[in-house]
Image: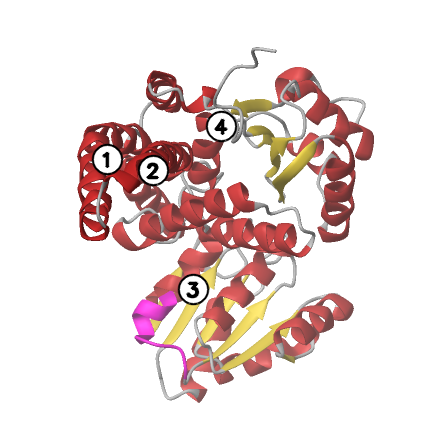
């Protein structure tokens, strides 16, 4: 199978180089058109903050990885990207790499579910741009199946491996569920935004955002359909929230112990969770001494993250086994593409010979015996073809070395002269 792929990713290049060749959705669509015009019959383009990858079936068997790299670098010029910033794959290795990506074992964060969705989105674009041909559809089907099995049959995606998610996940465990709880996120930067999104995903009933810069708070609140409170007076509203997650870049403590004590008195000491995911800390760690207050900072959350990451890494061998199974399943199917036509051609050849001989000799039999002749000769042909058919199917089921399967099918076809079958009307050599 001539599937070719290139990848520039978090393992091969720093973030500034990955950013330089990142393709947004419109650029992906445009790049696909350029690929179809020049190099690839069908394929898939995946571009995220951590990787840009191109998979394709070449229009010309002589296509090289360098040509594919040049196509990308001409489309997104980058002076600093070198040859060794790319990984290169072909055939089985290319399919396996896509399975690894979809399953989360090749992610910057092991078991990251986001990449699974990104692979699906990339294939959707390939479909919409008529870039997903017959072969790539099947490659995608098996890649998605590998990814789904990795998520459902292993713990590769279990537990939080980012501090923002760990904070929200721990909060959910404390309250059992969040669908009747209110939360305040202090800080609308990247960390605060991620935490806010996780809260929404977990079904938080009421979300409020505050930030020194009102415009950033409004932007995040609009995106998540959250409320806003002014930063200058947010401490007066602390008692209204069951959950407070703080993620600012403040050089000094924002919430002191007496602020929380005052809020707890107004809450009649109803349970409150404080998650400080800022460096330096936004919340006075002494607040953990207050009754009915659960306090966690980066140190305690990082311990949870490291434990979860270790658990995910321990699941990698299980995922690799699934990937190998689905890889073998795919190539069983792929090899059957070559076996099935050979089986049909073999049966067609023998049937043509049988029918021809019966036609020549049927007048030697009466009408009743002619029917028997049809039945008997068909049975003979079926028995003669039984073992060759089994061998062809075995070759089609070969999952380890596709080239060996192709060779075996070729030998059987040559043995029976399938490739040398004379055209109709030319069964006798020209003697003129």
Q: Residue at x 62, y 16 (%)?
A: 84
Q: CA distance from mark 2 to mark 1?
A: 7 Å
- Nearer mark to the viewer, of 4 and 3: 4
| Circle 1 residue | 381
The stretch drawn in magenta includes residue 162: no
Left or right, residue 75 beside residue 95: right
Q: Residue at x 43, y 82 (%)?
A: 181
Above/below status of 108 relative to 58: below
| Circle 4 residue | 1
Q: Which mark sits nearer the N-terminus, 2 or 4?
A: 4
Q: Which residues are magenta?
A: 171-179
Question: Label 3 crowding class (10 Å Cα cut-off): few <14, some 14-19, many 20+?
Answer: many
Left or right, residue 333 beside residue 54: left
Verify CB contact (< 8 Å) between mark 2 and mark 4.
no
Above/below status of 39 relative to 102: above
The stretch drawn in magenta includes residue 178: yes
| Circle 3 residue | 168
Q: Please state, as top left, top right, bottom left or bottom right, where the C terminus lies in the image.
A: top right
Q: Which mark sits nearer the N-terminus, 4 or 3?
A: 4
């Amino acid at each position: 199978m001539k599937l070719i792929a290139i990848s520039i990713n978090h393992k091969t290049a720093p973030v500034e180089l990955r950013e330089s060749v990142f393709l947004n959705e419109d650029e992906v669509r445009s790049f696909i058109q350029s690929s179809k015009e020049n190099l690839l019959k069908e394929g898939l383009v995946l571009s995220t903050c951590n990787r840009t990858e191109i998979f394709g079936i070449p229009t010309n068997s002589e296509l090289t990885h360098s040509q594919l790299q040049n196509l990308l670098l001409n489309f997104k010029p980058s002076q600093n990207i070198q040859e060794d910033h790319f990984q290169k794959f072909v055939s089985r290795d290319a399919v396996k790499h896509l399975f690894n990506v979809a399953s989360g074992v090749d992610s910057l964060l092991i078991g990251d579910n986001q990449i699974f969705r990104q692979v699906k989105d990339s294939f959707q674009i390939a479909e919409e741009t008529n870039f997903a041909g017959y072969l790539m559809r099947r490659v995608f089907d098996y890649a998605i199946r590998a990814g789904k099995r990795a998520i459902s049959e292993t713990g590769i995606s279990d537990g939080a491996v980012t501090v923002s998610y760990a904070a929200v996940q721990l909060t959910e465990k404390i309250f059992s569920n969040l669908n009747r709880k209110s939360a305040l996120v202090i800080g609308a930067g990247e960390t605060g935004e991620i935490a806010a999104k996780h809260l929404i995903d977990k079904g938080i009933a009421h979300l409020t955002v505050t930030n020194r810069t009102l415009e950033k708070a409004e932007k995040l609140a609009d995106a998540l359909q959250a409320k806003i409170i002014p930063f200058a007076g947010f401490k007066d509203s602390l008692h209204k929230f069951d959950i407070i997650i703080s993620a600012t870049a403040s050089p000094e403590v924002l919430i002191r112990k007496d602020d929380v004590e005052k809020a707890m008195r107004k809450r009649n000491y109803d349970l409150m969770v404080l998650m400080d995911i800022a460096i330096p800390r936004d919340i006075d760690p002494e607040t953990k001494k207050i009754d009915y207050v659960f306090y966690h900072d980066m140190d305690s959350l990082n311990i949870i993250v490291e434990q979860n990451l270790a658990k995910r890494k321990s699941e990698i061998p299980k995922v690799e086994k699934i990937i190998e199974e689905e890889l073998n399943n795919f190539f069983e199917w792929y090899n059957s593409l070559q076996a099935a036509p050979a089986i049909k051609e073999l049966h067609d050849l023998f049937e043509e010979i049988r029918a021809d001989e019966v036609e020549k000799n049927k007048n030697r039999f009466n009408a009743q015996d002619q029917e028997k002749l049809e039945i008997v000769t068909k049975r003979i042909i079926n028995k003669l073809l039984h073992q060759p058919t089994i061998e062809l199917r075995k070759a089609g089921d070969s999952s380890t070395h596709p080239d060996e399967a192709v060779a075996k099918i070729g030998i059987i076809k040559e043995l029976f002269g399938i490739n040398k079958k004379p055209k109709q009307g030319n069964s006798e050599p020209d003697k003129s």
